[in-house]
Image (cartoon, rainbow, N blue to C red):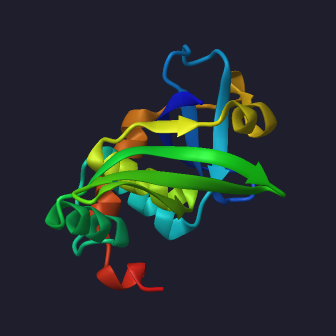
Amino acid sequence: MVQVRVLGVALDSAMQHIVLLKPILEEPDEGRVLPIWVGSQEATSIAIGIEGEQAPRPLSHDLMKTLLDTVGASVERVDVTRIDDGTFYAAITLSTPAGRTVLDARPSDSVALAVRVDAPIWVADEVIDEAGIPAGMVELGGDEEKLDEFKRFLEDVDPEDFQG
């Protein structure tokens, strides 16, 4: 397993949302980046968590954090454990008053929760080997412009936008 950081949320060439994970000990233009395709609502939730912003009403991942806090549990770590036929699998390890427990979860939900609680994110070496792309293929320029656009989004967002 290798510990990763969230580089950000982006759109691929087909306008599908992806979260980009990068090993924390690698330089920005070196090594590999793991793109994981996520839904638009999950992408929005991850972006909000990365920026430390708040949605007008609590999103599912905010509720998960509140529930964990309320019952005295905490997220020890998030693991992206495998990829099978293009589907990524993850696990959330919780520390609870009753002991440690591991929950099966989607990577998108796991990452959205991890960024809210500042939990470490780990990825199995085999997953990065199989699905990682060269870091040089990822363009991360224009961060200030993206941040301004995101802030405008938050000002104009309607809670109905998050209904399933």
Residue 150, given in percent of the width and then of the height, sits at: 36, 53
- Residue 40: quarter of image: bottom right
- Residue 120: quarter of image: top left
- Residue 159: quarter of image: bottom left
Of residue 71 and residue 37, the one placed in the foreground of this image is 71
Q: Residue at x 38, y 48 (%)?
A: 114
- Relative vertical location of residue 42 with respect to residue 2 in this rendering, above or below: below
Tell how many labels: 0
Name the side, left or right, on which 51 lies relative to 92.
Answer: left
Q: Residue furthest right?
A: 85
Of residue 137 and residue 91, the one placed in the foreground of this image is 91
Q: Residue at x 53, y 58 (%)?
A: 108
The answer to whether residue 65 is seen in the rendering is yes
Name the side, left or right, on which 141 lies relative to 36.
Answer: left
- Relative vertical location of residue 103 with respect to residue 145 in this rendering, above or below: below
Residue 131, given in percent of the width and then of the height, sits at: 76, 40
Residue 61, given in percent of the width and then of the height, sits at: 35, 65
The answer to whether residue 148 is seen in the rendering is no
Q: Residue at x 66, y 43 (%)?
A: 35
Name the side, left or right, on which 113 lies relative to 23.
Answer: left
Residue 55, given in percent of the width and then of the height, sits at: 26, 67
Indicate the quadrant containing the N terminus: top left, top right, bottom left or bottom right. Answer: top right
Q: Residue at x 23, y 69 (%)?
A: 67
